[in-house]
Image: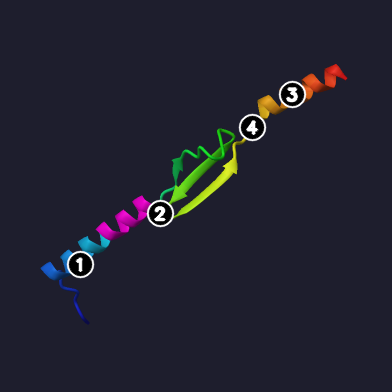
Amino acid sequence: MAILRLTLKTLSIAFAVAVVAGAVLLLARPQPIESAVLGTDWECTQTALVLTTCAPRAIPAVETLRKEAASATRG
């Protein structure tokens, strides 16, 4: 039966792997960004400083229901 020895080299490698993993997780987190080209109706996020995705801003359901109710009473 082999016993795992915790040497200084093993601990330093484990620490380096943990630091790299933490940095990757920090960079991979989606960050909101402003897009002056698309305007305020769009919401954009950038992931890992490379991938940028944009989607139309979601309209809250309350506003949608108010517009539908207003149009139904008018005509």
Q: Residue furthest top?
A: 74
- The magenta segment is 19-28
Query: Identity of the amino acid at label 2?
Result: Ala
Query: Identity of the amino acid at label 4?
Result: Ile
Query: Identity of the amino acid at label 1?
Result: Ile
Kindly report the distance in space between the C-alpha atoms of the residues bearing marks 4 and 3.
11 Å
Magenta includes 23? Answer: yes
| Disc 4 secondary structure class | loop
Q: Which disc number belongs to residue 53?
A: none
Kindly report the distance in space between the C-alpha atoms of the residues bearing marks 1 and 2.
24 Å
Side of 25 where 63 appears, left or right: right
In the depicted structure, whether residue 11 falls above or below residue 49: below
Side of 52 where 4 appears, left or right: left
Q: Earlier in the sequence, mark 1 or mark 2?
A: 1
Please state which of residues 57 and 5 is positioned toward the viewer in this rendering: 57
Q: Is residue 7 visible?
A: no
Residue with the mark numbered 2:
48
Q: Which disc number belongs to residue 13?
A: 1
Query: Identity of the amino acid at label 3?
Result: Lys
The label nearer to you, 3 versus 1, is 3
Residue with the mark numbered 4:
59
The label nearer to you, 1 versus 4, is 4
Residue with the mark numbered 3:
67
Kindly report the distance in space between the C-alpha atoms of the residues bearing marks 3 and 2.
39 Å
Q: Earlier in the sequence, mark 1 or mark 4?
A: 1
Side of 23 where 44 appears, left or right: right
